[in-house]
Image (tube, grey):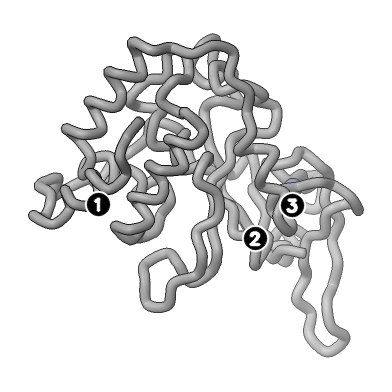
């Protein structure tokens, strides 16, 4: 159950209470899994309304249905582009780090940044055909998986992970013939089963791209390959 859901016409998430009160003719649909949600009033003595998914919806906002999204297919390997991307990361690691924090809406620890790159090595993310620098931070975050709760860290009050639209089955669909589904990613908070819709490519507010001296250490540790 979740307290909020994305309202397509309003272009933002609103509470089940507000939806029920003001938009009762609009059918609530989860933007992540596209299922129709029902309203449920929880607890007898308070009137808070929640949204509920149908059973077995397989929605990644519920539990750990994350792996499907991390296992997008790769059609062929692009060696030349991989060399370019890895070189770009080595030269722009801190910018990439900042972009990832912005996209996730959360502070990422430097050791986690190393882990994200290592996870990218394991999946050979660099070799996705024609992968661009602008899609790279999204791809690496989706591939990494769940960021654990971190007390006192911005945006880490609960677990969070990034997912692409479920209708996307190969990474190439994100940059070749992009459809409407390739225009956004989801920030998913599995503990509250809530999500935010984030437009791809809309990275603003990045300031201070000068890396601290010790940042390089975390970049090198990832041993890009
Ligand atoms: Zn859903």
Lower sequence index among marks 1 and 3? 3
Relative to 60, is 213 on the left or the right? left
Contact between labelled residues 3 and 2, with CB atoms less than 8 Å apart: no
| Point 65% across, 60% down: residue | 190
Dot 3 crowding, Cα within 10 Å, few <14, some 14–19, many 20+: few
CA separation in Å, label 1 and label 3: 49 Å
Lower sequence index among marks 1 and 2? 2
Secondary structure at numbered mark 3: loop
Q: Position of residue 82 (x, y in %)?
A: 36, 19
Secondary structure at numbered mark 2: loop
Q: Nearer the viewer, mark 1 or mark 3?
A: 1
| Point 32% across, 44% down: residue | 222
Residue 19's label in the rendered image is none
Q: Position of residue 87 (x, y in %)?
A: 23, 25
CA separation in Å, label 2 and label 3: 26 Å
Dot 1 crowding, Cα within 10 Å, few <14, some 14–19, many 20+: some
Q: Position of residue 133 (x, y in %)?
A: 33, 25
Q: Which residue is mark 1?
A: 218
Lower sequence index among marks 2 and 3? 3
Q: Residue furthest toward the bottom?
A: 45
Q: Which residue is mark 2?
A: 190
Q: Which residue is mark 3?
A: 23
């Amino acid at each position: 159950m979740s307290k909020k859901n994305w309202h397509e016409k309003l272009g933002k998430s609103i509470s089940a209470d507000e939806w029920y009160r003001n938009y009762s003719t609009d059918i609530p649909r989860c933007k992540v899994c596209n299922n129709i949600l029902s309203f449920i009033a929880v607890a007898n003595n308070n009137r808070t309304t929640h949204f509920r998914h149908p059973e077995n919806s397989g929605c990644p906002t519920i539990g750990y249905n994350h792996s499907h999204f991390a296992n997008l297919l790769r059609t062929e390997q692009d060696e030349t582009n991989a060399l370019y991307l890895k070189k770009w990361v080595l030269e722009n690691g801190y910018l990439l780090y900042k972009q990832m924090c912005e996209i996730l809406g959360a502070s990422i620890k430097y050791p986690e940044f190393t882990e994200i790159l290592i996870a990218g090595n394991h999946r050979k993310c660099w070799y996705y055909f024609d992968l661009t620098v602008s899609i790279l931070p999204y791809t690496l975050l989706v591939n990494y998986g769940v960021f654990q709760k971190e007390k006192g860290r911005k945006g880490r009050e609960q677990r969070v992970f990034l997912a692409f639209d479920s209708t996307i089955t190969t990474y190439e669909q994100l940059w070749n013939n992009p459809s409407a589904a390739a225009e956004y990613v989801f920030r998913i908070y599995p503990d509250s089963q809530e999500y935010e819709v984030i437009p791809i490519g809309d990275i603003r507010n990045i300031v201070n791209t000068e890396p601290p001296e010790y940042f390089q250490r975390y970049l090198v540790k990832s041993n890009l390959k």
